[in-house]
Image: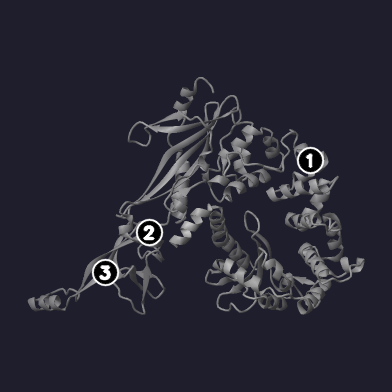
Amino acid sequence: MDKDWKKITEKLPVEPRGDLVNDVLSDIYDNGDALGTPMLLFHREPVTLAEPLKEIMCPEDWERRRQTAKHRWGARCTCTNCGEDFTAGYSDGGIVLETGPDDETCAGYAEPGPVTNVYLEGETVLCPKCWTAVEVTRRADLRRGRTCQVLQAEVVSVDAYTAVMYWLVSRHFDDAGGDHVMFLPHAALLIDGDGRLRRFRPKRTGYDVRDVVWMPCGCTRDPMQMPYYSWEAANHRKIGGWTLAHVPDLDRHTGEKTALKEYIAAGGCWPGAYLHVWERHPQVENLMRQGFAEAVVSTIDDTLDLANNVHDLCDTPPIPWVDWREVKPHRMLHMSKPAFREISKKHWRAEDAECWDRYRRQIPGADAMDFEYCRKRVGSKAVGQLLEIVAAGWEDLLPLPVVRYLEKRGSVKDGVQMLIDYRKMLRDAQMAETEETLWPRDLLAAHERITKFWANHFRASYQMGFTSTFIRFRALEWTDGELCIVLPRVEEDLVAEGKVLRHCVGTYGSAHCSGKPVFFVRHRRRPERSYYTLQINMNGTIPKEIQLHGYGNERHGDHKQYTHKIPRKVREFCDRWEREVLTPWFAAQRAWADRPAKKKQKAGRIA
């Protein structure tokens, strides 16, 4: 490293810029759950109920008031958001608040009844003082306080050097209702004059936050990938953080040729990981500046965002669809110059680039423009499904001929999955495979005919598999209050779903029992009525959605000539279920499967 590193460290900032602080504080207090949830602290205390005082009180009035007074247990509450104290009723494990005519909560002692609600510990209630959603929390649980933390990354210029500063934003709640936010220096990644990364750590020299001296570290690990404490995180250990979108001008600085500004502008949240990729492969700058920034960002960020544990993290996440032996962008992606020039305007993401890499490897002499033609019409996901089918021996289902066939038949929307299902059912029914049956003139009608034929004559019994599948995945049944996720119990449930919604899910019994389960999306109040059908692939390293369809695969009319869209609330509900229920459950199952056998046996005996 440069010999004058001590002079450089003296110029590294020890506190964040004012606009960063203001932005973070705004996020925390305007979005109540950005870093810890505001709480309504309560503890039990005696409350005396007596007649109201009059303007003039005689001794008899005072005596009568004293004799009729009632002593009850109430709750003393403090809102951490507004700092206000008030009294509420007390219920074992929670508080009692009166509800006004507009469903607003009112402060004051109350008892359980028709105009009051009981809020138990852990539930959310609107504070009657500031109308903020707060979590009901017993004050005794905060005797030692509660601290939520997150790393905030910021790109700064120090003389001619570029550095990424990491501030530990610490939000501390105490049992008195205090809510304190501090910004502590955590780490710094600096690009030196030789284009190498250098990492520094803060050393405290006093009690003030600014009493810090930056010291060099022996390694350059990404600070965001090193676990740090936060109360709300699993096992109180968190990785990742926030990245400030504003990046200063890096011209004539050591970060000029890193394309770090383009990475953050494309939504990148792991600047340290990107700089490690750049340090190993400097030519990544060419892709970032030539239209593939979104693909690089989504590859790096998805790899780290979807990591199930610390062992899945990597300072230099791999980008497998790039040939790092090349320097020129079109050669790095194995495209011709004209094709690269055209495709660079399309803003590919990681799944598109990965699918192209598989396409060119699997199809000799593949043309990138042919792939783009297919991707634009059916999407990378559908092209990937066709490549899987081709690899399985269905050599006539190459993406380009299939897409052209679907365009001629007017069945591009969801046509790939429909054709694949049709071909599988045709094969399983052992029907004659002629040119007319393999490539029907009316794919929708042919698909419906074979679906009915299969459902009526060739349904096998999968009850044993259905029972085991239900036991395995029943923890994934869930509701948000309006919609719900339901698992089929028997094969007849799938068949009935397919008949009502007029699609081929009735033939999915084998897939359902072999790691690609089908889930029913229903209205919570009428869970017996078919609504939408969701299928998930559980056989990979992460769960992936295969398809989500409703009536007629979103087609209706006498000849299914009309199309309609999946309702937004259904799509958002499924996304929320996959994010909040499916992914954590899958990660927990995988972590359990990875544990040594002896530990599993011991845990089983304890349970």
Q: Which amino acid does label 3 sit on?
A: Gly
Q: Is mark 1 on a helix, strand or loop?
A: loop
Picture coordinates of residue 506 (x, y %)? Answer: 72, 74
**Which residue occupies the extreme right position in the image?**
435
Q: What element carries label 3?
A: strand
| Residue 501 appears in the picture as rendered | yes
The numbered dot on residue 334 is 1
Judging by the rendered image, the residue that carries numbered circle 3 is 74
Residue plotted at (65% across, 55% down): 540
Residue plotted at (52% across, 42% down): 224
Judging by the rendered image, the residue that carries numbered circle 2 is 39
Q: How far apart are marks 3 and 1 (CA)?
A: 73 Å
Picture coordinates of residue 487 (x, y %)? Answer: 61, 71
Side of 52 where 243 appears, left or right? right
Q: How far apart are marks 3 and 2 (CA)?
A: 18 Å
Picture coordinates of residue 72 (x, y %)? Answer: 23, 72
* Position of the C terminus by quadrant: bottom left
Give the mark toward the camera: 3 or 1: 1
First of labels 2, 1 by sequence position: 2
